[in-house]
Image: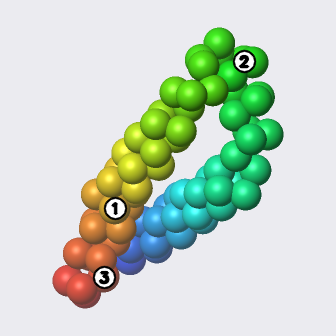
Amino acid sequence: MSLEFWIQFLGWMALVNGAILILGTIALSVAREWIMGIHSAMTGVDRVDLPVLYFSYLGNFKIAWIMLNLVPYLVLRLAM
């Protein structure tokens, strides 16, 4: 496996995971009440507690995306 393969792999991985992050953020912003109703019914978590959990989820996802996808891609891209 060449360095070019890893650059392409990390680039696509960053793109796909970035799109998932953006879509999740938009979905939670636009359809918050509907999503909260579904998650509250599925998990039994009170609707009052869900916004904190959503914020934590999106924050953790963003940090993981930056550290595991974006940074390695940029380092390899700049190293070439």
Kindly tell me whether residue 57 is visible in this rendering.
no
Residue at 47% x, 65% y is 14
Q: Viewed as shown, does residue 79 lie left or right of 44?
A: left
Query: From the viewer's perspective, is the residue at label 1 or at label 2 nearer?
Result: 2
Q: Percent from the top left, x then y, of residue 20?
A: 60, 57
Residue at 58% x, 63% y is 22
Circle 2 residues within 10 Å: few <14, some 14–19, many ≥20: few
Instruction: Give the quarter of the figure containing the N terminus.
Output: bottom left
Instruction: Give the quarter of the figure containing the C terminus.
Output: bottom left
Query: From the viewer's perspective, is the residue at label 2 or at label 3 nearer?
Result: 2
Q: Earlier in the sequence, mark 2 or mark 3?
A: 2
Please name the residue that numbered disc 2 is placed on.
42
Please name the residue that numbered disc 3 is placed on.
77
Callout 1: helix, strand or loop? helix
Please name the residue that numbered disc 1 is placed on.
66
Distance in Å between CA atoms under marks 1 and 2: 30 Å
User: What kind of residue is marked 2?
Assistant: Met
Residue at 59% x, 17% y is 45
User: What kind of residue is marked 3?
Assistant: Arg
Query: From the viewer's perspective, is the residue at label 1 or at label 3 nearer?
Result: 1
46 over 19 or under it: above or below:
above
Callout 2: helix, strand or loop? helix
Q: Viewed as shown, does residue 23 lie left or right of 38?
A: left
Q: Percent from the top left, x then y, of residue 77?
A: 30, 82
Distance in Å between CA atoms under marks 1 and 3: 15 Å
69 over 47 or under it: above or below:
below
User: What kind of residue is marked 1?
Assistant: Ile
Q: How many marks?
A: 3
Q: Percent from the top left, x then y, of residue 75?
A: 23, 75
Q: Earlier in the sequence, mark 1 or mark 3?
A: 1
